Amino acid sequence: MLDNTLNISDLHILIVEPSSVQSKIIRSHFQDAHVNSVDIVHNGAQAIESMSDSPPDLIVSALYLPDMTGTELVQTMRNDNALENVPFMLISSETSFEQLDPIRQAGVVAILPKPFEVNDLKRALFNTLDFINPSASEVDSMDFDDFHVLVVDDSLMARKHIRRVLEKMGITSFSEAINGQDAVAIIENNFFDLIVTDYNMPEMDGAELTRYVREKSSQSSIPILMVTSENDNNRLAAVQQSGVSGICDKPFEPDTVKAYLKNIMAGI
């Protein structure tokens, strides 16, 4: 039987970086990590044209491009059937929550700072491999037959990204809700093995949803994974106290989710 598993050296990466100097530096870091195929473009339009001709295994982009932002680039990709599943990595010195949150919501495998550490790059590359082709030995050991997941997020792109990551692990049965209030109605009429919910949502947020499930639902023991870009420690502490089973940062990283699912399956 042929082994179709990808290795880091097999990845084809497209770097989108306005600065020729920065793009060469970034390429050298990827080459040091044993990535052999790296192309460079300098704006969003070039990236879209290049991807349309030959979709890469990973897009690595700056946040600020001459003709659009990295956020607009990934949103364009997520709305294109041919490109929506291409993993996206952001490299940026930006630290503003307001600037970074939209790109987290769109679904990225990693957000690395400038400059970034080699270990962070390697982790991001392994997350990319996990996203493209999850480890067969780890995934096959989990029995996801009849495993039903409720994904709750007010962002359609975030819901689609969460589903993509979970589908790569062999989960096929999903329901979706746009906020906690919508989720409550669904939970009362369906049984779930896992709830994956955002924190910040209109009508009813993730913490309120969790308290409802734990205190009022007939399925009070459902494992709940909170996925959030929240960085306020006091608010995160309140979320933990509400009864979540685990908190996962955005980006929704395959290795973190895989470890969490293994713990869930061990307890079933």
Image (cartoon, rainbow, N blue to C red):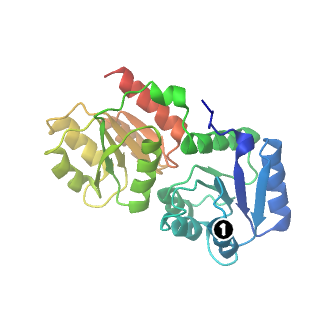
Q: Would you call the spot at circle 1 few (<14 residues within 10 Å), some (14-19), or many (20 or more)?
A: few
Q: Which residue is mark 1?
A: 53
Q: Nearer the viewer, residue 104 or 107?
A: 107
Q: What is the quadrant of residue 221 in the picture? A: top left
Percent across and percent down for residue 230 are: 46, 50
- In the rendered structure, the answer to whether residue 158 lies left or right of residue 92 reads left
Picture residue at 64% right of the left edge, 54% below the top = 58
Q: Secondary structure at mark 1?
A: helix
Q: Position of residue 43 (x, y in %)?
A: 71, 73
Q: Classify the position of the N terminus by image quarter.
A: top right
Is residue 230 something that shows in the picture? yes
Specify the quadrant of the image occupied by residue 141: top left
Q: Is residue 189 left or right of residue 131?
A: left
| Location of residue 243 with respect to 72 vertically, above or below | above
| Residue at 30%, 35% in the rendered image | 147
Type of amino acid under label 1: Asp
Residue 91 visible in the picture: no
Q: Is residue 49 above or below residue 40?
A: below
Count of labels in the image: 1
Q: Where's residue 59, x and y in %?
A: 65, 58
**Residue 38 in the image, given as x and y percentages of width and height:** 77, 55
The C terminus lies in quadrant: top left
Q: Residue furthest front?
A: 1
